Image (cartoon, helix red, strand yellow):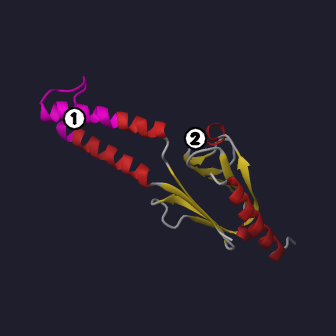
Amino acid sequence: MEFNEKQYFRKWWFILILVIVMGITIYGMIQQVVFDQPWGNNLMSNSGFIVLMLLLVFLLGSIFLMRLETKIDEKGIQFGFHPFQRKGIFYAWNEIAEISVVEYNPLIDYGGWGWRISLTGKGQAYNVSGNKGIQVRLKNGKQRLIGTQIREEATKIINHHFNDAEAANPKP
């Protein structure tokens, strides 16, 4: 039994904000670079506009390429933001003290979505959207929350593999 999930940053409101910012930047760049009409109070150089445009295109492209991948199998759990974390993070079952699928508040518990560090001592979160996640507490005390949109399937696979791993390695 194996669990695989890929989640993408595709919130309509987030994309809308980026498109609006890019539209305003394109408008200003065309006004200044093409029509030679200075745009704004603090003038940016033509090369500055071009660099800003390239950065915005890179940001938008990165958001469309970025995805949270989670894999759970008989070895453990692996997750990460690809393509930035090529191999991702892996925890073998024998490293995990507790694991369960929970409901949480992304804004209050972790300050939003993405790769986050909780200011309230709940560890790190890797999430894209929603309010359900796989809560992992490691034997070394570290905590991780991995967002999921497939709660029931994740719970079923975790229960199967984690219980098997505990039975194979009983606590002393």
Q: Which residue is drawn at 74% across and 71% down?
A: 94
Residue under label 2: 112
- Front residue (pair 75, 125): 75
Question: Is label 2 in a helix, a strand or a loop?
Answer: loop
- Give the class, few, some or many, for how many residues have Cα within 10 Å of label 1's Cα (few <14, many ≥20): many
Magenta portion: prevailing SS class: helix
Magenta highlight range: 21-48
Q: Which residue is drawn at 42% across and 55% down?
A: 65
Q: Which residue is drawn at 14% across and 27% down?
A: 37
Left or right? Give the position of 46 relative to 94: left
Is residue 27 covered in magenta?
yes
Tell which residue pokes out farthest to the top in this image.
41
Closer to the chain start, of discs 1 and 2, is: 1
Left or right? Give the position of 46 relative to 67: left
Q: Position of residue 70 (x, y in %)?
A: 59, 61
Is residue 5 covered in magenta?
no
In the rendered structure, which amino acid carries the disc numbered 1?
Answer: Met
Depicted 12 relative to depicted 148: above or below: above
- Tag on residue 29? 1
